[in-house]
Image (cartoon, helix red, strand yellow):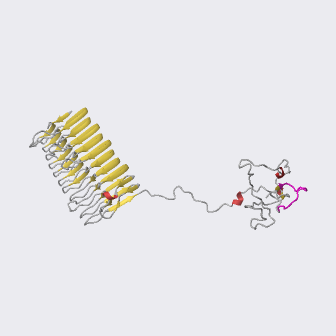
Amino acid sequence: MIVQGGAQISTASAKTSSGQGGLLFVKASDSVQLIGTSTSADNPTPSGLFALGEGSGKPGDLTIETGLFIVRDGARASASNLGSAQSGGRLSVTASELVQLIGTSANSQDRSGLLVGSAGTGSAGELTIKTAKLQILDGAFVSARTVGEGRGGSVIVNASDSIELNGTSADGLPSLLTTETAGVGDAGNLTIETGQLTIKDSAQITSSSTGLGKAGDSKIQASSLSLNQGSITSQTTSGNGGNITLSVKDFLLLRRGSEISTTAGTDQKGGDGGNININSPFIVAVPKEDSNISANAFTGRGGRVDIKARSLFGIESWPHPTLLSDITASSERGIAGVVEINTPDLDPSRGLIELPTNFVDSSTKIAQGCSNRGRQTASRFIATGRGGLPESPNELLRGRAVLVPWVTLDSTLGNHSQEVSASTVSSVTIEQPIIEAQKWVADGKGNIHLIAEVWANIPVAFSSPFTACAQ
């Protein structure tokens, strides 16, 4: 389905009517495209779908169901109250694949968009979008707006994959997703749920008041949120700022002067700053790029900023706004607000064990194997060092101690083998069962022999004074 060249499909109630406007339902399996405006140079008419009310009765509702829904070059879809009805109409768009809004008319007078609004005493209605992907590009807009005495309408967006707001129109109008009041009424609320949310190149998500009313509240739930010279605001010129609640599963990224703000009294008038609540594992900014999270006021009280995150990189809290990326809740002439940053409590002792205060006596862990058949009640171990054996490990080596020479390899055999002289082989034969050595002796050549008993034909150079263990 294509509507273009200024063509319109609409339902409307007359100015003198007190009845409710008609219902407009559009269903197309593939796509619905609204393109451009009429060619009139004086008063171009936007192509589109409209459910309007100009009397005292409630406007009708506009419902669109399709696969692709595209609005571009100044075309529009709207359910608006232009009369005195107490409530506006309802605009509902369901597109299984994509909702795409692009640009303005050729003369930049008309912006492509979706709108529920009120220009009279009544309130604006409700605008809902359900799709996989939503794109708002080059100055297009999605808006619930009132310019009269009534309350602003609400906007609800559910885009399962992603939402992208990108760029401005040729004359600098930002791509916009907004609830707004320019009158005495409060702005409506904005609710967004998506996977990846991207706002860049001066695009905005805002719930604001340029009149006397309070700004609306914005609630955003996303897997990731990236702002690159983009903004999420709930600001007022004189009334109280609205609240912003962000629940981000993976990370929040702020680049190139991006802003999350609930500032009040931007016209240097009264109004308290709104509150900001952010829950995200990681919040990342570049310090010198002046990206800010602020709940400030001019003469009123500053708002409250509550942040729960594992880590913050490149942004920190300051009492007043700076030229760096900062988090503030100040008031230029009033009372400052509160900034509270909560990170998980880290217990440095978690995963550690407490060591015992009583040391184990190692002597109780050494086996007492050298009992000498019950004749000795204690065993001893002595470190000999590099030389012979002293009488006690606490004494110096005496002259009568036998020094054991270093073992060297025969130069003719290299490092691979060593000839053993028959004279170095002890003639002592150890019979089964093997028993512990009782003494050691030195033969005439200075060789040491461990023996179970002293042989009469071997000269004893020195006997161990300990008879219980081989030393």
Q: Please state the horizontal and vertical placement of residue 382, each as a whole percent of the image.
A: 75, 61
Give the left or right position of residue 280, taking residue 148 as reference: right
**Front residue of 51 and 350:** 350
Q: Please state the horizontal and vertical placement of residue 441, each as a whole percent of the image.
A: 84, 58
In this view, 465 is above or below 36: below
Q: How many marks?
A: 0
Give the left or right position of residue 324, taking residue 374 as reference: left
Question: Could you tell me which quadrant the C terminus lies in?
Answer: bottom right
Q: Is residue 200 magenta?
A: no
Q: Is residue 458 magenta?
A: yes
In this view, 430 is above or below 446: above
Q: Is residue 332 visible?
A: yes
Q: Main secondary structure of the magenta part?
A: loop
Extreme-right residue of the structure:
456
Q: Please state the horizontal and vertical placement of residue 77, each as a whole percent of the image.
A: 19, 40
Give the left or right position of residue 294, taking residue 87 as reference: right
Extreme-front residue of the structure:
412
Q: Please state the horizontal and vertical placement of residue 262, each as a whole percent of the image.
A: 27, 57
**Front residue of 288 and 33:** 288
**Front residue of 21 and 192:** 192
In the picture, residue 438 is in which quadrant?
bottom right
Q: Is residue 87 visible?
A: no
In the picture, residue 193 is in which quadrant?
top left
Question: Could you tell me which quadrant the N terminus lies in?
Answer: top left
**Front residue of 137 and 90:** 137
Q: Tell me the magenta residue range.
A: 450-464
